[in-house]
């Protein structure tokens, strides 16, 4: 529609468009990653109509996490979500199988409703593990409306430089290097400081907080001092006992001598 051209709105950036019954309001629901403020401007006349633009913010986006292993706690999903917006009602829905023999059982997909921060959208892939050392990293697929497509092979979007326009199959056929999970997770940390809760915990063990570290040293020194003081006390008491023993011995010897001399007399 040429009104969209006039407003510089790309049709691909639109998720829904509703024309109200009075025909004088067009409601355009943009994809979450699109910043609406660039389309706002002063009133203008188009085809005999006065056109005014305004935004309404209310959109709640359902974000689905597919193939989440049971051992991955909901807290890891909330933590990841906090980098992209606000979770509604702190609630995770566990989706269930429909219409097959497993009908009604949880299917490994968890969903949360979110208010995405303007201009932000989730990546398609993340690797998460459970809290135990034996829990392995598993690839979780994230999906929501208006997401930018990410290549399953090089893990980049077209904008980030996937040569196949983020189509994984094509990217593999083009023999583009696959990005390793390690490099990918490192890039998330470099790009927006994301680190899973488990990784945060593990690195806190490897590099203890300097204040905590100092506390540990202080308490160790305290314990050592107490131990030395106790040892000194024991040595002192032992020495006192020894002196007392010597006294007793000498007393006994003297008594013996006195007894002897009395008997000799
Ligand atoms: Zn690619």
Image (tube, helix red, strand yellow):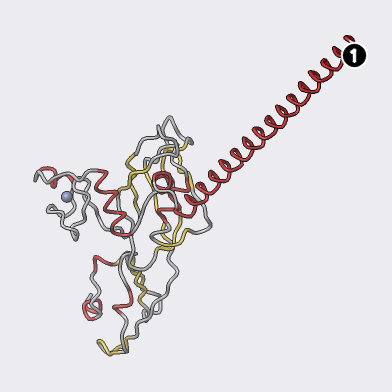
* Residue 4 quadrant: bottom left
- Pinpoint residue 36: horizontal percent, then vertical percent: 33, 74
Q: Nearer the viewer, residue 199 or 155?
A: 199
Q: Secondary structure at mark 1?
A: helix
In the picture, measured across the screen, residue 202 lies left or right of residue 155, that is right
- Pinpoint residue 117: horizontal percent, then vertical percent: 39, 66
Q: Nearer the viewer, residue 84 or 190?
A: 190
231, above or below 32, in the image: above
* Residue 20 quadrant: bottom left
Q: Is mark 1 within 8 Å of ligand 1?
A: no
- Circle 1 sits on which residue? 262
221, above or below 54, in the image: above
Residue closest to the far left: 174
Count the labels in the image: 1
27, above or below 249, in the image: below
Residue closest to the far top: 264
- Pinpoint residue 230: horizontal percent, then vertical percent: 64, 37
* Residue 86 quadrant: bottom left
Neighbor class of circle 1 (other Cα within 10 Å; few <14, some 14-19, many 20+) is: few
């Amino acid at each position: 529609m040429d009104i969209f051209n006039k407003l510089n709105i790309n049709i691909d950036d639109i998720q829904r468009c509703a024309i109200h019954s009075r025909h004088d309001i067009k409601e355009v629901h943009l994809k979450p990653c699109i910043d609406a403020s660039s389309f706002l401007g002063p009133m203008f006349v188009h085809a005999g109509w006065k056109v005014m633009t305004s935004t309404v913010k209310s959109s709640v986006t359902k974000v689905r996490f597919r193939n989440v292993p049971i051992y991955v706690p909901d807290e890891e999903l909330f933590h990841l979500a906090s980098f992209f917006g606000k979770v509604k009602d702190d609630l995770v829905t566990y989706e269930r199988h429909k219409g097959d023999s497993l009908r009604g059982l949880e299917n490994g997909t968890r969903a949360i409703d979110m208010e995405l921060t303007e201009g932000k959208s989730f990546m398609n892939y993340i690797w998460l593990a459970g809290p135990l050392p034996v829990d392995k990293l598993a690839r979780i697929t994230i999906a929501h409306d208006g997401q930018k497509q990410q290549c399953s092979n090089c893990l980049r979007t077209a904008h980030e430089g996937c040569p196949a326009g983020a189509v994984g199959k094509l990217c593999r056929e083009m023999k583009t290097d696959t990005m390793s999970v390690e490099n990918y997770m490192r890039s998330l940390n470099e790009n927006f400081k994301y680190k899973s809760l488990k990784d945060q915990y593990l690195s806190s063990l490897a590099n203890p907080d300097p204040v905590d570290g100092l506390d540990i040293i202080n308490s160790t020194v305290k314990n050592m001092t107490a131990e030395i003081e106790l040892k000194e006390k024991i040595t002192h008491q032992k020495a006192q006992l020894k002196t007392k023993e010597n006294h007793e011995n000498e007393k006994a010897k003297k008594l013996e001598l006195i007894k002897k001399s009395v008997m000799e007399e």
